[in-house]
Amino acid sequence: MKLLFALLVFTAVHVNLLAQYPNYFSYNIENGAPSNEIYSIIQDKDGYIWIGCDAGLFRFNGVNFEQFSSKELTSRAVTGVCQTSSGTIFAYNFNNQLIYIKHGKLSVVKNWKESINHLTADSKGNVWISTINGLYCFSDKTLKWKEIVDLDDDGKKESFKFVYGVQASGNGAIYFSLNGKIIERRSKKTKVYNLNLESSYEPIYITSGSNRPFVFRMISGTIFEPTKKGYQQANHPGFSNLLIGRKLTNSQEIGNDIWVSTYSGIVRYNKITKKAQLLYPQIAFSSVLKDNEGNYWFSTINNGVLRMANLNILCWNYQTNPDFPDQFSYLIAQNKQIYFTTIDGIIGNFKDDLRTIQLTPNNLKSDIGAVYYDDVEKCLLFNKMNTIFQYQNGKITLLNANTHPVKNFYRFKNQYLLATSQGTFLYSTPKNKFKEEKLVMQGWSRDLIKSPFNDHVFIATNTGLVECSLINKEFKQLKTYALNEQILSLCVNKSELFYLSFNGEVYSLGKNKKPKFLFKMDEQYRMVEIKYKNGKLYLASNLGLLIFDINTKKKTLITVYDGLSSNNIKDIAFSSNTCWLATGKGLNRLSMSDLNDQNSLGKIVLRQLKVNGKEVHFHDLRQLNFNDNLSLLVDGLSYRSHGNFSFAYRFGKNAEWIKVPNSIEELTIPRLPIGNFVLELKLVDANGNSSLNVIRLSISVSAPFWQRWWFYILIVISVGAISFLIFKGRVSQLREKQKQRLHHLKLENELRLTQQNALKAQMNPHFLFNVLNSIKGFIYENDKKNAARYLSDFSNLVRKVLDMSSLPTVPLSEELETVKLYINLESMLLEDDFEFELEVDEAIDLAAFKIPSLLIQPYIENALKHGLRHKKGNKKLILRVSQAEDELKIEILDNGVGRMASAEINQRQRHNHTSFATKANEKRLELLNFERAGFVGVELEDLVDEMNMSKGTRVTIRINC
């Protein structure tokens, strides 16, 4: 233990605390600014920041610097920037060229040759110019100037006209210095105030305000303040002493503050409190501006532009004082003393009068695990490397060199409770050597606090919030809240306990002992501590200081954009009306009233509109086509967001906002809704707040022709016409089908008629008469056998013909049987030299193969009657049946006289007779092929010999299977 304590060498060091400055954002050449040498800065009526610098005249929107220049300029460096009531920007360069900007274009005033030392703009649109040769008034409307001949309105022309520092006041007067005097010039009356200066050439700085201004001498820094009778040298030692030895560059009045820029810092003097403050004495300042958001902008001669979000948030770190540490870990405010620790083990304290700070470093670089102020012992306890120390009156005493990793202390009556990663333990007081007495509860514990309801103690653990009580000198666990949740931090007010969980949830616990959910932060917020003050909860996080109003439920986030030196908040402490923050980049001091005033909102400016790439005026945007491309050039003026903002737009009040990044040069709306609507645009700043204004554009987008009323009517008419045509076509189809059906029925009737006609042909009277006569002859000749045979064949033929005539198709075997019966009967009428042959392909299944009934007989009849009957000699008839693939082939061959000879014979004997059977069969073939195209085909061929003499006829019938 002695060795460990020997390593801890503590030496108290006192450091002056005067270097307490607000944190600032810097705009310089390294991060995109045009120059580090800035001479003047203003904010125009639209919210843009204008700077005059050695690189020229620039407009700044918080992200980009836009330069305005002209070929007429003979010098680049610009200063004296101001704006008239009509919005025109005026300035001058170092060659005394008077320049102005209208409608986005820089112009040079012609024929101006005077040497300018200052510009100012009054409320009437005039620019007043002070020169070494007099005072001039320039009209913004006519762009003409006039010289003020009688400067002091004494009726005499001035012989010596060294005018300096002209300034327009809010009271309507123009103030300037002339030959060591201050002139107050109004439209009807001019007053002269003698300052009794030794030199008439000494530059004088005049502030601009709502009343008579303060006056400062450039060299000596002497202050003249207005009185009822005139001016007198001011007696403000705190203010005057800060100006001694400093070369003045400007003086300005903002609200109740007077700002004096010098080559070695800027001095702020409050006319109400009479307190003066010097900021950043190592920087040369040229002017100051307070913008619409409450930011303060400082132009410097060597360091670019500095922007301070809040002058009342002071910072102590290495930037403001090289002897001061940067990274803090714990804070405790007690009895007007502020105690703090750093991540490398330094412990220190100072009074809240901010005069000096006492640092106690050591050569053992290690973080401090926990800090606690014992109000009974009036000392500070802290843990370092499992060792407990006491810090009192700048001295550190070792209490216990062998403890647990302590996360927090709490004095409970005459004992100490220690929350550690190894459990909760009970220790004796420092007077009793701070010894470990017993284990109260096992498990990782982080925080301890006394109950606001009774004498119990609440312990934040990794498994919930545990309520304990001391009964008979023994701590007992009464109840566990938020079971299995990791609790990080606790705080109380008079009637409630508040606890913060690891997952970012905050709860309150009242007298009813029922946890009440308050709010939850997103996962990116890693909150480490919760504190209560005046009805609000303060939470330290990695993204800033979160303030939750318990009554209104409103959340406010304070970040670097609001003036903190870092968003990484480690600890919070309160002293009187002051909030102290330990951060990763210094110690911050905030006024509680400043924390409640965070209403600075940004602004969105619409600079240009384009439709299909062409610029249009706002009033010409009322009517667009559905396929027009709308582009908007917008600027987001949210300086406090430091470029970290976005744009959002929507179509109408009830629509969802669509966010787009601020990096886009033009905001292009991809799809415009059809009809009348209001396009709304706004800015969303770094804290998620909407801009102060919302741009609203009333737009009417014409629908495409296919969405217009006349097109709908045309569609209805077209649909009606098409429906009518379809209906008419359908009716025509039905009629055609009906017609075809009727025709089909007609054909069926005709087919049946042809079958009847074929039957008639089979049974024609001539044939019947001849057959019966032949049978009668056999009977007369007493040839009973032949008579009986023929009579039997005749009866069979009649029966078969009658049966087959009612059938559309019959087996081929029955058709051939009927044909043979017919041929046998017809052969009786021929001579004995008739010969008949029937040739059938053996591969054909005669019973299974079906053909139209009574199809072959008519052609057999023609062969017998017209071919063979007229032939003398041997008569031969061949019937051949074969099959090739899907086709049945029937050939009927005779060796008769041929068709031509038969036609001649018939012509002579029968004149114009045409075979009834032939006509009927032709009609039948037509009907069969109508129902099934190509079903039956018939070919007739005349057979001739080498001498081209007829030797018979061949009939080929082809039936598709």
Image (cartoon, grey):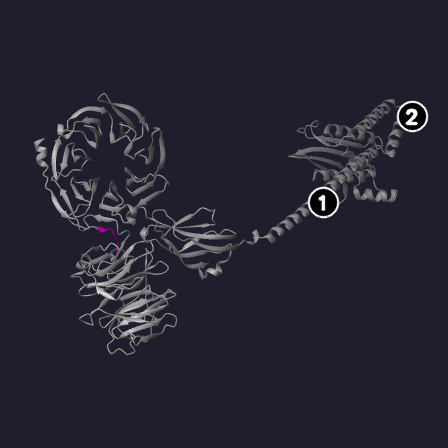
Q: Is residue 908 magenta?
A: no
> Can you give x and y, in whole percent of width and height, for residue 634 in the image?
39, 56
What secondary structure is the magenta-colored segment mainly? strand
The quadrant in which the C terminus is found is: top right
Contact between marks 2 and 1 (CB within 8 A): the answer is: no
Please identify the residue farthest to the front as the structure is shown: 229
Q: In front: mark 2 or mark 1? A: 1
Which of the marked residues, 2 or 1, is nearer the chain's N terminus? 1
- Residue indicated by mark 1: 732
Q: Residue at 9% of width from left, 36% of height from top? A: 7
Q: Residue at 36% of width from left, 42% of height from top? A: 554
Image label count = 2
Query: Label 2: few (<14), some or many (≥20) within 10 Å?
Result: few
The image quarter in which residue 29 lies: bottom left
- Residue indicated by mark 2: 780
Which contiguous range is marked in magenta?
21-27
Q: Disc 1 on helix, strand or loop?
A: helix
Please identify the residue farthest to the top as the structure is shown: 472
Q: Is residue 133 above or below residue 859?
A: below
Horizontal placement of 572 versus 44: left or right?
Answer: left
Q: Is residue 91 visible?
A: no
Q: Disc 2 on helix, strand or loop?
A: helix
> Can you give x and y, in whole percent of width and height, for residue 753 in the image?
81, 36
> CA gap, disc 2 to disc 1?
69 Å
The quadrant in which the N terminus is found is: top left
> Can you give x and y, in whole percent of width and height, for residue 588 in the image?
23, 46
Amino acid type assigned to the residue bearing label 1 in the image? Ser
Q: Is residue 26 magenta?
A: yes
> Can you give x and y, in whole percent of width and height, for residue 409 in the image?
21, 32
Amino acid type assigned to the residue bearing label 2 in the image? Tyr
